[in-house]
Image (cartoon, coloured by chain):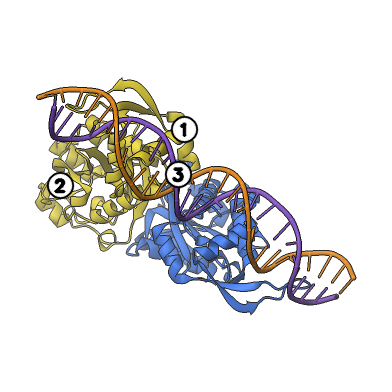
Chain colours: A blue, B yellow, C orange, D purple
DNA sequence: ACAAAAGTGTTGTCTTTACACCCATGG
DNA sequence: CCATGGGTGTAAAGACAACACTTTTGT
């Protein structure tokens, strides 16, 4: 949705195509330079940053809508994507929004009772993506994007700080029970990369040897013959994660402490 | 909502009071006679059983709506209640509903484009209640209720079997990490009761001595001076659960295996 | 040769599991 | 006094935590 005509049509008739009162607002996690980051968009006119978001089409399955919204924004399909909470309690989620503000921000004519401004609940999804594969698309409503370290999130628009905080808590809890960290790395990775990733996510130091032992003993990773050159240092081996064991572990739940 | 006038008003103007497109459908777990049971309602006209449900008021916080719906149905406030999933994928959740059927079932005049029949997403909550304290209220749409063993759930209306299955999976997983079983028992309980409860929920045998040791070592229960008379057998001691430790454990997450 | 990062085993401690007999109660 | 269920401890096995030196690489 980029041209002003498309947007005007969306504003006027979007309620025929989309379900009002509900949005999907994904928290997209990526990992880069030893930082866990989330994708933020700069909303035009609002002069502030927030999460991506989108509506559900009238006849579209919910999870398909979530995937579509992520696909449109990151170019990626088939990624790790999971519902984590419905937000409908904060003051922002109780109000109608202001049509007046919208007119000012985007210069588009709109009635006060337009569907866009009714109260919406937000279905929070979080996604784990391979940072290096993402190419972000902006649209009419968003003029810029950035990947922001989760330890350094500014005040966001709407109730999005709450969503980010909850997504992060969920991720940290879940990573103790399911080996989902893999989704943040490329297909081939080194043990030290994985190790640092987990330390970054959990925000604490993990014993190098015990960490490796655990992953190997769980059968989650397979050592490859290849090594990676990393400058004037010993070359680490590359690993792949083991899809079958992973699927099993996802279902069963693991108890690990790393 | 009991009289036909109230219902007619709800059908006609409910969309002014309630958010369309979203319902809350709670799975209410109780424990009785060594069975884990859920509360099912018989929907009038539909000739089948389903979960309770309700709409969210336009300006009502989401979690408050969930509590209100449970309060209306069970008479209980302040119970353990937790979001677990939003359902919006199954064929039933993609369709509009049939106004024709509604007219036949309830004998109430309604237009085909009435708000009630648009596609709705269902926000699944599950509740853990003290069975002995519940008094169920039926209304115009529901003519009967029953507590049904979770191992013996019939085919339910709509997509409610899916919701029950997911609620049960969530409960079983969660009970490994948070000591939520307490919510299903009265304030004072015996160790054997707790033990059987956990065996029932998890569907497997748990070592009697190890189970007790674990609960005590976690500091979750406190032995009382009282005992309970249980017929021609040794009288078991009563226990209380320890609210502070419990709250802490809820937040932190526990790893226990029982 | 040096600096920087990777790789690799062992031991003590704690947690978990497996297991059986005596005790209390009411009829 | 008998039938039924409640209460209680110990030992072996397994999991976890703590810990440091050698190897590899590029410059």
* Residue shown at 60% from the left, 70% from the top: A189
Q: Are marks 3 and 2 on the same chain?
A: no
Tell whether A64 sits left or right of B144. Answer: right
In the rendered structure, are the residues bearing label 2 and label 1 in contact, judged by CB atoms less than 8 Å apart?
no
Is residue A140 in view from this perspective?
Answer: no
Q: Are marks 2 and 1 on the same chain?
A: yes
Residue at the image point whose x is 33% and y is 44% from the top? B207
Q: Which residue is mark 2?
A: B43
Q: Which chain does the residue under circle 1 lie in?
A: B
Pointer 3: what residue? A93
Q: Are marks 3 and 1 on the same chain?
A: no
Disc 3 is placed on an element classified as: helix
Q: Earlier in the sequence, mark 2 or mark 1?
A: 2
Which of the two marks, 3 or 2, is nearer to us in this view? Answer: 2
Write down the chain letter for disc 2: B
Mark 1 Cα shell of 10 Å, populated few (<14), some (14-19), many (≥20) = some
Query: Seen in the image, is A149 located left or right of residue A17?
Result: right
* In the rendered image, the vertical position of residue C21 relative to residue A247, given as above or below: above
Chain of the residue where label 3 is placed in the rendered structure: A
Q: Specify whether residue B141 is in view.
A: yes
Q: Position of residue A141 (x, y in %)?
A: 55, 60
Dot 1: what SS?
Answer: helix
Position above or below: A249 against B65: below
Marks 2 and 1, how far apart at CA: 41 Å
Residues at circles 3 and 1 in contact by the CB criterion of under 8 Å:
no
Residue on which disc 1 sits: B245
Q: Position of residue B227 (x, y in %)?
A: 28, 23
Q: In which quarter of the view is residue D5 placed? A: top left
Report, in whole angstroms, how far the alpha carbon at label 3 lies from the one at label 1: 33 Å
Q: Residue A223: x percent and y percent?
A: 57, 73
**SS for callout 2:** strand
């Amino acid at each position: 949705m980029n041209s002003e005509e498309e947007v005007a049509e969306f504003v006027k008739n979007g309620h025929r195509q989309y379900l009002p009162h509900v949005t999907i607002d994904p928290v997209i996690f990526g990992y880069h330079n030893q930082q866990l980051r989330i994708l933020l968009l700069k909303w035009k006119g609002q002069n502030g940053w927030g999460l991506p978001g989108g509506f559900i089409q009238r006849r579209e399955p919910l999870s398909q809508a979530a995937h579509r919204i992520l696909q449109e924004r990151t170019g990626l399909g088939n990624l790790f994507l999971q519902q984590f909470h419905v937000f409908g309690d904060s003051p922002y989620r109780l109000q109608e929004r202001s049509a007046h503000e919208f007119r000012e921000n985007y210069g588009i004519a709109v009635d006060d009772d337009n569907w866009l401004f009714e109260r919406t609940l937000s279905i929070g999804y979080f996604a784990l993506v391979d940072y290096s594969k993402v190419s972000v698309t902006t649209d009419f409503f968003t003029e810029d994007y950035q990947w922001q370290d989760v330890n350094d999130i500014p005040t966001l628009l709407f109730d999005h700080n709450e969503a980010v905080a909850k997504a992060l808590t969920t991720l940290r809890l879940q990573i103790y029970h399911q080996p989902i960290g893999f989704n943040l790395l490329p297909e081939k990775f080194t043990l030290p990369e994985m190790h640092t990733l987990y330390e970054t996510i959990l925000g604490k130091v993990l014993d190098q040897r015990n960490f490796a032992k655990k992953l190997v003993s769980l059968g989650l990773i397979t050592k490859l013959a290849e090594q990676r050159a990393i400058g004037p240092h010993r070359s680490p081996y590359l690993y792949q994660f083991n899809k079958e064991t992973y699927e099993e572990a996802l279902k069963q739940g693991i108890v690990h402490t790393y």
